[in-house]
Image (cartoon, rainbow, N blue to C red):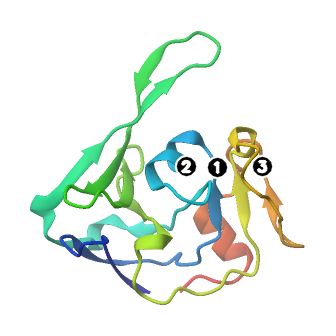
Amino acid sequence: MLLEGSCHCKAVRFRVESRHPYPFNLCYCSICRKTSGGGGYAVNLGADNTTLEIEGGENLRVYRARMEDERTGEVTTSNAERSFCGECGTHLWLWDSRWPDLVHPLAGVVDTDLPVPPERTHLMMDFKPDWVLFRPGEHDQVHGHYPDESLEDWHKRLGLES
């Protein structure tokens, strides 16, 4: 499925092909919450990084999150690069060098109509703040950290690959 998206001010627009366009994966980690703002979680999609086309790329900025080990206090920098519009601050997508063929646009910046998922996966729930209301659907999955099931596996299990 071709996904088209943009930042709020339209200084950055993009197109990317996705075999996994269902917005089902809700991440409650502090990095996703704080970089995407709003409702207490981020909804990340999966797409083919080799098909990513960008207009207004000169307006992009990249953030690599600071990560602190809760046990040791050691501070490192994330492999993941979060791309933002330098004009309006909209977080557009995440790319990680460990999976270079994938890019993860945020569902909220996709202008294309997305399909409605039959179930959702709530992940990193151990990091959800108390103020975030949580009402899972009947078939939703809930995980304290990352689930074993990948974006691709979820789509395959439900027969939803496009």
Q: Seen from this angle, which residue lies furthest right? A: 138
Comes first in the chain, label 1 or label 2 = 1
Does 154 appear above or below 147?
below
* Gap in angstroms between the C-alphas marked 2 and 3: 16 Å
**Farthest residue in the top direction?**
72
Q: Which residue is mark 3?
A: 143
Pair 2/3: label in front = 2
Q: Quadrant of the N terminus?
A: bottom left
Nearer to me, 154 or 56:
56
Find the residue positioned furthest to the left.
58
Q: Which mark is residue 33?
A: 2
Q: Quadrant of residue 115?
A: bottom right
Cα gap from disc 1 to disc 2, whole angstroms: 6 Å
Q: Given the image, on which type of amino acid does mark 3 rest? A: His
Q: Residue at the spot x=55%, y=49% of the render?
A: 33
Callout 3: SS: loop
The residue type indicated by label 1 comes to Tyr
Residue located at (62% from left, 19% from top): 70
Tell me which label, 1 or 3, sits earlier in the chain: 1
Q: Position of residue 126 (x, y in %)?
A: 75, 39
Nearest the viewer among 10 and 45 is 10
Q: Residues within 10 Å of mark 2 (few under 14, many from 20)?
A: some
The amino acid sitting under disc 2 is Arg
Q: Residue at x 73, y 79 (%)?
A: 158
Q: Secondary structure at mark 1?
A: loop
Q: Which residue is mark 1?
A: 28
